[in-house]
Amino acid sequence: MNTSFLQQTAGALLAHTAEAASIPSPAQPLPSVERIKELMNRLKTILFPGFFGDACANEMAMTASLERLYPILDGQIHSGLCFAGNATPTALSSATLTHAFIARLPAIKRQLATDVKAVKDCDPAATGYGEVIFCYPAILAMLHYRVAHELLQLNIPLLPRIITELAHSATGIDIHPGARIGDYFSIDHGTGVVIGETCIIGNHVRLYQGVTLGAKGFVLDSDGLPINLPRHPVIEDNVIIYSNSTILGRITIGHDSIIGGNIWQVFSVPPHSRIVQKKATTTAFIDGLGI
């Protein structure tokens, strides 16, 4: 192999082009996707004790699990702070955030339990809570979302998005960690569901596959770049949205409403609404006439 050729190519790769000038190479270690996967696997054993890995059925076992979790979480938070431009985050700052997140784990566990119950209660095919926890993609997606949302609430950079994108890759369910989702949330089947950053979803809401809760458009600044304003729907309590419906913009779907399948909705609807498609027209053809 021609060494001078490799050196020349290496120099070209390291050179700053005009296009790459805004993407500087990081000087500090970045969060590790593999370590974050390990973090989520450990959190599964903690948030669903007895279902994954070693059982955490007593206080001693749970304490041991938290002790194993702590250094992974602390290290990844530290790397996230480095990524965000804090060149010298202190051990104290990452430790404070790690403590704050661990203190929220009981609340996350409570919310996940409501999600498991909602999925089980809404699906006659579910044989029990264990099947829902082990097999249903909605629970994996919600586990990642609820963890990521709490990390984002603590202003921890990058980690929340990595965590939700891991679930997105595994399940086809794309939930931005910034969305606000209440208790007893269920997604049936799940593939293709998209929930945008500024969505607000109430309690006892059910979505089916292919539902999009998205933005209708963006407000641009003087440089033509989008401004991060509330732009996704507000879904109130006890709403059902059936498969492949698209709800766009900062509109409100009133409580106790039903949105039928394949609906394109860009206007708010009051509580107790029923939005469905018009009936299909049936036409009889004889010997091909009328086609």
Image: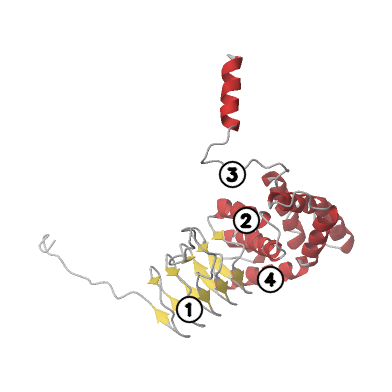
State if disc 3 and disc 4 touch (CB < 8 Å): no
| 26 w.r.t. 278: above or below | above
Q: Residues under labels 1 and 2: Cα distance?
A: 27 Å
Binning the other alpha carbons within 10 Å of mark 2 as few (below 14), some (14 to 19) or many (20 upward) gives: some
Please state which amino acid type lies under the numbered disc 2: Arg
Residue indicated by mark 3: 23
Could you tell me which residue is drawn at 70 percent across and 62 percent down?
155
Q: Residues under labels 4 and 2: Cα distance?
A: 20 Å
Residue indicated by mark 4: 111
Binning the other alpha carbons within 10 Å of mark 3 as few (below 14), some (14 to 19) or many (20 upward) gives: few
Q: Residues under labels 2 and 3: Cα distance?
A: 18 Å
Question: What SS does tag 4 mark?
Answer: helix
Question: What SS does tag 1 mark?
Answer: strand
Q: Nearer the viewer, residue 269 or 224?
A: 224
Query: Which is closer to the viewer, label 1 or label 2?
Result: 2
Q: Residues under labels 4 and 1: Cα distance?
A: 23 Å
Query: Which is closer to the viewer, label 3 or label 1?
Result: 3
Dot 1 or dot 2, earlier in sequence: 2
Q: Which mark is residue 253?
A: 1
Question: What SS does tag 3 mark?
Answer: loop
Q: Is residue 49 visible?
A: no
Q: Nearer the viewer, residue 197 or 257?
A: 197
| 10 w.r.t. 77: above or below | above
105 left or right of 4 in image: right
Please state which amino acid type lies under the numbered disc 4: Gln
User: On the rendered image, what quadrant is the N terminus found in?
Assistant: top right
Q: Quadrant of residue 199?
A: bottom right
Binning the other alpha carbons within 10 Å of mark 1 as few (below 14), some (14 to 19) or many (20 upward) gives: many
